Image (cartoon, helix red, strand yellow):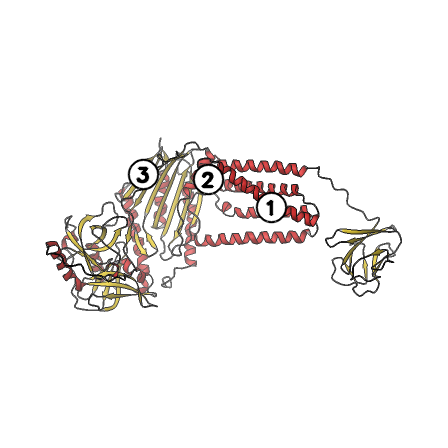
Amino acid sequence: MGTVMWVEVLGRDGEVVARARIDTPEARIGRAFDNDVVVNDPHVAPHHLRILRAEDGALVAEDLGTHNGLYAEHGAERVGRLGLGRDPGLRIGRTTLRVHDALQPVAPEKPLTPPRAHARWGAGLAAALFLLILLVNWLELTAEPSANLVVLPLLGLTTVLALWTGGWSLASRILFGQAQFALHLRIAVTACIALVLWDQVSETLSFALAWRALVEYGGLGAWAILGTTCYAHLRAIGPRHMNAVAGIVMALIGTGAAMQHMGRWESRTQVGDRAALGELRPPALRARPLASADEFFGNAADTRARVDRARLEDPAPGGAVEAE
Amino acid sequence: MRFLPFLAAAIVWSTAAAQQTATPPAPSAAQPLSTAAERVYDHARPRIVQVRTLLVAASRQSSIGSGFVVSADGLVITNYHVVSRFALDPKTYRLEYLAPDGTKGSLELLAIDVAHDLAVVKVERGGLPYFTFDTRALAGTLPKGERIYAMGNPLDLGFTIVEGTYNGLVDKSYDERIHFSGSINAGMSGGPVAASDGRVVGVNVAKAVGGEQVGFLVPARYAAQLLERARKGPPLAADKAREEVGRQLDAWQAAFYDALKASGFRTAAVGPYLGLESTAPWITCWASTNADAIPRPRTAASTTRCSSTAGIFVSDSILTGRLDINYSYLKAVDLNAFQFAKELSQRSRSGENRRGRRMTAQECRDDFVAVGAAAPALRATWCMRAYREFEGLYDVTLLALTQDRDREALLASITMQGISHANAVALGRRFLEAIEWGR
């Protein structure tokens, strides 16, 4: 083990506010100015802590008999001595410190995103999204074409995208220090493209396979896309507390999806399916083999079983008819 | 706008208790017809009752109708729909009569005929004067144009007589109905319609909404038949009435679809396609087009709608027994295949989905079907809902869309209300098999 260590004092948001190089085998830390590292925190004792090396050379923190004591960075229990070999973080008063051995390996350099790459991608994808929406609207246009049909959706989409991206950029600026507008725009536009494509794919598959549920529960796919998008935005902001934040986001998305699904389910049990052919596509997109009349009416018989069951589960009010 | 000469005959029934005081019209100068009306009214007055359905919990009327005495021991004929609340829910409702002399008493339900909308109830009084049936009416030989007199208690205004004209049986109707040219109003339901000698020729039942002075009567012979049944058979137990309604609805649909089959089908051209058409006289068809629409439609549509005018009142929220067969031939004018498919999706969505706890939720099944080697491929959807109160009866909708062309198609639908599963499958199958490319 080497002899040099670094002590980092972290700020409120986890950023490093001060860093001291210690060449001596032992470092003293506290509020008094005769320490090696001076911590400006009223809850820290004048001579709070010393860092020394154990016999195997590993770094160890030792409480110098203070009132507020010594804790591991994420620990809830006060300790007298704390080995720093595995986790370099520790807490004294309201301050978090990290102690690193000079020989500690660090991660290799992260490749730098080429300058303006996100901006280029974002703009390209946004153009693709607008074209995609124009295409979808055109394919669904059955009335007289009008400029409003083109302008209004694009205007609405632009507004939503601007607000959404702006919100994430603001959060990014506050928590990470950089707005990363282009990156957030790129994520948001990608999500929009995914949503539009999912909508089209689920409708087309629903037609091709004559599978009604696919469209009915297509909303769940949209929720999943929303969840993935939020995760991507959070990753861009910073990897700190990623698991906890991702968990909360997933829980929120899951709750939203569940609530929407519940409403759907309730109206389904009361009103049921709609007597309609659903979203249709040109006949060439059919993927399901043609059934014979026997097969069709045979399969359709399960609707009878289902309505008969529904009838028995919730009998008519009033007289006791089926009592016998 | 679609023009229909004959809107669904709305059932005459009302809970409205009119508040204004009814002043009897001043007797006009002696005219022969009015004299006849006075005579009929005098004859009828002691023989008519008001039939009231009361809410047990509140002991107040929840609906009113009329009825008339047909035997000395107090058998009274009225409409089924006047007593339907009691028949379907005897715990919540009870029946009461109110005679013109002010006497009141409870009524016992003896027999019902849901198909013809008739019921026999019994007044707990003996030695009553009563009506007899007109023999010409029973034999169906009453001449068109004869003056007849409808009686009842319209809008709870008091016992009233309405002079009108007998116009024979309604054409194009599966259920026999007399066309009465005279005013029939809510509250008169179940009241008698008598010839000038005071003999009954029919029973008030309905009026055409959207028509003027177009009323409908149940022919007297069905009343006579039900009376016979009520005399011979055991009285209807209150808790068995609903089962009886279900049994009669089932029998009605069996007879209706047998009659439909017996009167035959032919294939009818809808654009270049062929579809199923009934040759039964009581199925009426109407055609419409959007060819004259402005701006010029991007899809040319010509539609044929056929329906039976049959409709059976079961309860305040259930009217059943209708059969509708619709065909639309659609051809893209300047839409591409995707746009045309979108247009078809929107058009197939027109059927509204009825809410209400009287029916179960609707269950549908989608598929692609080819009924024969030469037949065009179809996108078909089969939907069913069951009547909660009546076992084995369903409302069934079958939609079919031809899949053999990109930019033209036949959109077909058939809706069968109050039908058994077997009948629905049989007719549905015939309906699908009839769809062909005809040119």
Residue A208 visible (yes or no): yes
**Which percent across, then down, holds residue B268?**
31, 36
Q: Which mark is residue B287?
A: 3
Q: Residues within 10 Å of mark 1 (few under 14, many from 20)?
A: some
Residue A51 image-quadrant placement:
bottom right
Q: Which residue is mark 1?
A: A164
Q: Quadrant of the C terminus of chain B?
A: top left
Q: Amino acid at mark 3?
A: Ala
Front one among B161 and A85: B161
Q: Residues within 10 Å of mark 2 (few under 14, many from 20)?
A: many
Q: Is residue B186 left or right of residue A119?
A: left
Q: Is residue B52 left or right of residue A112?
A: left
Label 2, secondary structure: give it.
Answer: loop
Mark 3 vs mark 2: give the one in front.
3
Label 3, secondary structure: give it.
Answer: strand
Distance from Cα at disc 2 to Cα at disc 1? 33 Å
Q: Which mark is residue B349?
A: none
Residue under the point 35% across and 45% down: B426
